[in-house]
């Protein structure tokens, strides 16, 4: 259904201007209400957000009530940017302001300051779009921590809505006949993922999810300027954003696309769509990462600092996807051993196994562009492992790879017992990892 149907232009009676009308929002809201598919998406997304976030904050409050804030609270946040809000405020901030949140809050307040050299070099690993948004909301008078939570929640809402719409498109292509149900399941598996507390934390995960899904959705509809703009902004959000160039190019050349019919039938590797001038929009994809490097260079730093900063976080190049093999070995060595490092490596190995199964499923079910995106996005973390934990942060990288959720949704379709079991188990894992994160235990 076209989102621009003429009958959606519903006029308000004279003299009954609403607050939305005063802000110029009446026409978009009218179009939204008149489109049943969009309203279905809004309802499913709203349900997924409030239920999952209620679980996240309940788990955090319950864990802190039993265990306290954790023994290393002041060690890992010496500036105090994640505390000092009173007892109740500190409790409510727990699932939102831990670990990397302190870096984002610091960058939003002080900037990157590359002129200070090694003292601020670790900041360069955190890409700028999220702290820019955080700073913009803070300048409007919103407390920085609250600004980060609001930014993350807003991005999560847009990301899940776009995911719902994109899944509906793919369901129609696959002729599943239950596109709304598949989209609902996809949204729920994303919102209730074991590490989904990051979506409402002062982290860039939800912003990256919204931009990457948006890039795919606009590309599927043939709106290449918007697709490239989303991908370029994603590249300014995290380094793996530049990987969106590959799936966008594949969608442009091979489809599926809703903007026009293929120019030719696919013959081996020959593209189905001929090159046109709108392909040049894809040159915007690396713009975000290039702009970040230019800024650092003009500010007196190293334009390549975002990549060099990985060494400061103990990451090293182990060959293409070499970290996957070392992660398997580390996980196998951890079997039967006690200790924090061993348990972390076992958990990370489990996420790698689940991700590998999901990748195979995506490659078999969805257009190749989706599987290519998952592979390209995982290339960086799996090629630059951390010595002690080769798969460190892998759960966070998997969290935003939405093709895995679409595939998982298809496995749950028409299997209510499996749906209840998986979402229930995932919810328990989400509560557990939220509690660990809230008490300053490293989880991903």
Image (tube, rainbow, N blue to C red):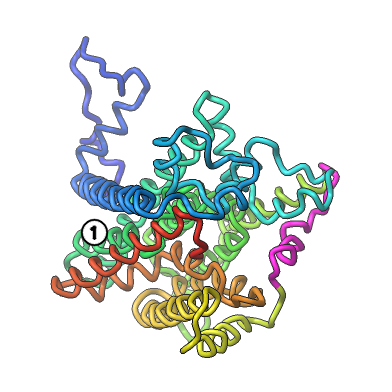
Q: Residue 434: horizontal and vertical position, in percent?
A: 39, 57
Above or below, 242 against 337 in this view is: above
Q: Is residue 310 magenta?
A: yes
Based on the picture, tell me whether residue 294 belongs to the magenta stretch: no
- Identity of the residue drawn at 55% across and 30% down: 138
- The residue carrying pointer 1 sits among few (fewer than 14), some (14 to 19) or many (20 or more) residues within 10 Å by Cα, namely many
User: Going by the picture, which residue comes out furthest to the top?
Assistant: 15
Q: Which residues are magenta?
A: 299-315
Q: Nearer the viewer, residue 254 or 160?
A: 160
At horizontal 57% and vertical 32% (from top left) the residue drawn is 136
Which is more toward the observer, 250 or 240?
240
Residue 334 against residue 249 in the figure, above or below: below
Q: Is residue 259 visible?
A: no
Up the image or down, 406 lies above or below 288; here it is below
In the picture, measured across the screen, residue 255 lies left or right of residue 304, that is left
Q: Is residue 32 above or below residue 285?
A: above
- Tell me if 119 is positioned left or right of 175 in this view: right
* Of residues 338 and 256, the one drawn nearer to the viewer in this rendering: 338
Residue 75 visible in the displayed image: yes
Report whether 353 appears left or right of 238.
Answer: left
Could you tell me which secondary element the residue under label 1 belongs to?
A: helix
How many marks can you see?
1
* Residue occupied by mark 1: 184
Q: Position of residue 256 (x, y in %)?
A: 40, 68
The image shows residue 361 at horizontal and vertical percentages of: 36, 80
The residue lying at 58 percent from left, 87 percent from top is: 325
What percent of the width, then of the height, locates residue 437? Answer: 46, 57
The residue closer to the viewer here, 39 or 104, is: 104
């Amino acid at each position: 259904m076209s989102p621009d149907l003429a009958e959606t232009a519903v006029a308000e009676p004279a003299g009954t201007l609403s607050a939305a009308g005063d802000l110029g929002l009446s026409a978009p809201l009218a179009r939204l209400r008149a489109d049943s598919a969009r309203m279905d998406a809004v309802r499913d997304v709203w349900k997924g957000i409030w239920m999952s976030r209620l679980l996240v904050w309940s788990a955090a409050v319950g864990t802190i009530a039993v265990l306290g804030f954790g023994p290393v609270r002041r060690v890992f946040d010496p500036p105090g940017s994640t505390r000092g809000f009173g007892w109740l405020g500190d409790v409510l901030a727990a699932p939102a302001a831990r670990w990397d949140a302190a870096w984002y809050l610091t960058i939003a307040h002080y900037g990157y300051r590359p002129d200070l050299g090694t003292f601020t070099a670790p900041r360069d690993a955190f890409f700028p779009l999220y702290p820019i948004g955080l700073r913009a909301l803070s300048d409007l008078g919103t407390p920085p921590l609250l600004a980060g939570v609001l930014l993350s929640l807003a991005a999560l809402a847009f990301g899940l809505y776009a995911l719902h719409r994109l899944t509906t498109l793919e369901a129609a292509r696959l002729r599943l006949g239950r596109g709304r149900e598949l989209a609902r399941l996809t949204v729920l598996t994303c919102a209730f993922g074991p590490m989904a507390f990051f979506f409402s934390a002062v982290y860039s995960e939800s912003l990256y999810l919204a931009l990457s899904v948006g890039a795919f959705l606009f590309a599927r509809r043939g709106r290449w300027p918007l697709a490239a703009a989303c991908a370029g902004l994603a590249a300014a959000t995290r380094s793996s954003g530049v990987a969106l160039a590959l799936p966008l190019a594949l969608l442009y050349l091979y489809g599926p696309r809703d903007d026009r019919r293929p120019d030719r039938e696919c013959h081996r590797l020959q593209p189905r769509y001929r090159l046109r001038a709108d392909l040049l929009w894809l040159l915007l994809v690396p713009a975000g990462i290039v702009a970040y490097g230019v800024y650092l260079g003009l500010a007196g730093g190293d334009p390549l600092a975002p990549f060099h900063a990985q060494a400061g976080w103990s990451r090293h190049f182990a060959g293409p996807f070499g970290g996957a093999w070392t992660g398997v070995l580390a996980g196998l060595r951890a079997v039967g051993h006690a200790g924090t490092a061993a348990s972390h490596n076992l958990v990370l190995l489990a996420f790698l196994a689940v991700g590998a199964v999901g990748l195979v499923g995506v490659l078999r079910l969805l257009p190749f562009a989706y599987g290519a995106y998952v592979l390209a996005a995982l290339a960086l973390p799996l090629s630059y492992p951390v010595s002690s934990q080769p798969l460190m942060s892998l759960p966070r990288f998997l969290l935003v790879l939405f093709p895995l959720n679409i595939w998982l949704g298809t496995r749950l379709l028409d299997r209510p017992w499996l749906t209840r079991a998986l979402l229930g188990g995932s919810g328990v894992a989400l509560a557990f990892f939220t509690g660990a994160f809230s008490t300053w235990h490293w989880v991903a």
